Image (tube, helix red, strand yellow):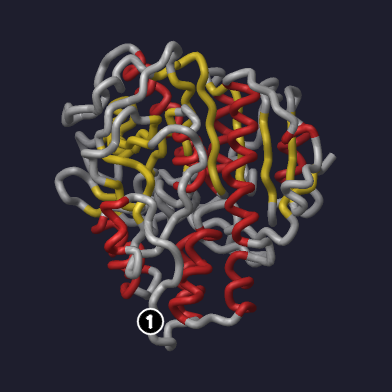
Amino acid sequence: MTTTPLINRKRMTRRHMLGAALAAGAAVPLAAVAGPAWADPAAAAHASTRLRLPAPTGPHPVGTVQLHLVDRSRPDDIAGPGHFRELMATVWYPARDVERYPVAPWMPAGALQAFLADAGFSALASRGPLTAGHVGAPVRRSGRRLPVVVFSHGAHSHQGDHTVMVQELASHGYAAVTVAHQYDTYTEFPDGRIAVPLHDRQAPTLPGDFAADLRFVLDCVEQLAAGCNPDVDQKELPAGLLGSLDPRRMGAFGWSKGGTATACATLADERIRAGLSLDGPMQMNPPLAGDLDRPFMMMTAEFTRATDPEAAAFWSHLRGRRLNIQAQGAVHASYGDNEALFPQVAKLFGWSGQQLQDVIGTLDPDQAVKIQQAYPLAFFDEHLRHRRGHLLDGPSPAFPAVTFLP
């Protein structure tokens, strides 16, 4: 896979999808966003101006904190001598008390402005959604440590692009850690630097580089579990975070190139007890060298085993519990926050139904959001918590669009 994958068979990076979509409605004046106010009282006043993410369905409020990480085992030749791989990561977790803690934005302001500017449409910068995560809220502690999932984003994207899934998992008692893959992402560092994707074939942005980031984040999770703060600036962490994570129950998931990276990391690192790919191309370099005996789930849309030889080859190497589901009408961008955000963008710019379908497919957006909330949770519950329900046994009347591929 190259640093700009998805370049044929209607394959596009997240940035190009956004740019094309916004361009389709750029000539239409802005209109008010219809819909209910934010669930969070502090954000209610801005409901008419911001895009909205659906609230998580779990029983716990959500807390969040950013971490500034440096992997000193990996020199950064792009940054120059003496520099090492530098990453931003965000931990999402069930919180004990959120009333006094501000709500986190979908993306840091500077990163959001750069993201939308590159897409050719800066007018949405003031409309970025808020999340359900409360910055710095204390961790809810119970009798057991929190199972952990780490998330890898797609090419030219950002660590917040699957916030619907991430905050859903946190609201159900998981610690979810998202990572911003340097040189192929939009993020903001504590000193104010804004990182954007680097169009350089020498940049470390292959799926294997993403996978190395995930494995380093697992190292950091182990540090947090042991009571050590991995943040290079030693920032103050939320009360209860140290010692609250369970390094014996860790999983991983990712979208697009991040799904491929998840597969690479799961193959290479036995600490990942279960992996989930969201329409990952599975274009691995070097090719697969062995089999995987741990659970793995594929949620496919465009990169199906029937049409994509790499996906079929990866499937053939799965020796543990394996699942492959597909939502009818889904496209590559369907398994993520797009399904919640683009219908609102379509209203803002007066898009036709066809213009919206060109971006997010024909899968009903509300159903798509519910699929994102239900299936990853069921998968990780089964393999990290030993809570097996019936959702993964086969077709469900609650999700008629979801088919199980043999």
Between 302 and 37, the one lying in front of the other is 37
Left/right placement of residue 385 relative to residue 329 reads: left
Q: Answer few, some or many: residues within 10 Å of disc 1's Cα (few below 14, many 20 plus, some between 14 and 19).
A: some
Residue 348 seen in this snapshot: yes
Q: Is residue 406 left or right of residue 21?
A: right
Residue 164 lies, in percent from the top left, at 49, 47
Residue 132's x, y, as percent? 38, 45
Q: Position of residue 374 (x, y in %)?
A: 62, 40
Residue 70 lies, with reference to residue 355, above or below; the image says above
Instruction: State which quadrant residue 238 falls in.
Output: top left
Residue 212 seen in render: no
How many badges with numbers are in the image? 1
Q: Is residue 224 left or right of residue 267?
A: left
Residue in the image at 35% along x and 42% along y = 133
Percent across and percent down for residue 24 are: 50, 81
Image position of 306 with respect to 378: above or below: below
Residue under circle 1? 30
Q: Nearer the viewer, residue 353 or 149?
A: 353
46 lies above or below 41: below
In which quadrant of the rendered view does residue 392 lie? top right
Q: Quadrant of the C terminus?
A: top right
Q: Is residue 346 above or below residue 69?
A: below
State which quadrant residue 220 falls in: top left
